[in-house]
Amino acid sequence: MFLQMKMFFSMHKQKIFIILLSIITIILVVVAAHVLSFYKSGTYKTTTFVSTKKDFSITLQDNLEMDLSGNNNYELLLKSTNNNNVIAVSRTEKNPIYSIKDLIEADKTNYTSQYEEPQNISEINLGKLKNYSYYKYSFDAKEHYVEVYWFEVNNYYYVFDFVSDKNSSIDLKSNITSILETLEFKNFNITEQ
C-alpha cells in the first residue's frame, strides 16, 4: 500500500511540475508579446516641425533626436543632436524653361558629385504618398545614405534631403517613409504628375 501511495504521489508530482511549467511558460510568452507590441506600436513622443514659411509640416518621433537648426537657405533644417543625420528641405519656384525631370537629373548629378565615391545611385523614380506625387532618387556614400524627394506643389518645388549617418545607432534611413507619411502641405492645391 505504501508503494502504491508513493507511485501515486510520484505520478502527481510530475503532472504538477508539468502544469506549473506550462503556466510559467504561458505567462512569459504573454509578457514578452506585450512588451514587444509596446515597442512596435511607436509609443514614442513626437514633435511636429513647421517650415519657415509655414506652408508644410512634418512630424518626427523624439527618439530620432533631431532639432531645428537655423539656416536661411532652407525652409526646414533638422540636425541630429548626437550624429550626422540631417533632414534639409528647400523650396524653389518652378522654372518654365526646364522640366522637373531635367532639374532633378541636374540636382542628382551635382549632389552625388559632392560625395567621395558614391555608389548604388538609383534612377529617378515617380511615386505617390497620400495625395502627393513625388520624384525620388537615392545613393550610398562612404558614411551616409542619401534619399532625395521632389514634390511639385502649385508654383514651387519642395526638395526633401534625408542624409542618414551609417555609423549612427539612430537609423534615420528606416524612418524616412514614416516621416513622409506625416507630411502636410498647407493651403495648397497639389499638382498631380
Image (cartoon, grey):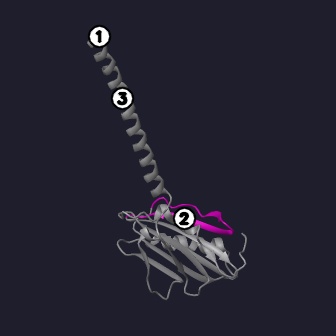
Q: Which residue lies under the disc numbered 2?
A: 178
**Which callout, 1 or 2, points at the residue further toward the start of the chain?**
1
Gap in angstroms between the C-alphas marked 1 and 2: 71 Å
The disc at residue 1 is: 1
Q: Residues within 10 Å of mark 1 (few under 14, many from 20)?
A: few
**Which callout, 1 or 3, points at the residue further toward the start of the chain?**
1
Q: Are marks 3 and 2 in contact (CB under 8 Å)?
A: no
Which quadrant of the view contains residue 2? top left
Q: Position of residue 85 (x, y in %)?
A: 41, 71
Q: Are marks 1 and 3 in contact (CB under 8 Å)?
A: no
Gap in angstroms between the C-alphas marked 3 and 2: 49 Å
Magenta segment includes 11: no
Residue closest to the eye, 193 or 122:
193
- Residue 95 placement, left or right of 31: right
Q: Residues within 10 Å of mark 2 (few under 14, many from 20)?
A: few
Gap in angstroms between the C-alphas marked 1 and 3: 22 Å
- Residue in the image at 54% along x and 64% along y: 178
Residue that sits furthest to the left in the current view:
2
- Residue in the image at 62% along x and 67% along y: 135
The residue tagged with tag 2: helix, strand or loop?
helix
Q: Position of residue 32 (x, y in %)?
A: 42, 48
Say which amino acid is labelled 2.
Ser
Residue range in magenta is: 119-142
Say which amino acid is labelled 3.
Ile
The residue tagged with tag 1: helix, strand or loop?
loop
Say which amino acid is labelled 1.
Met
The disc at residue 16 is: 3
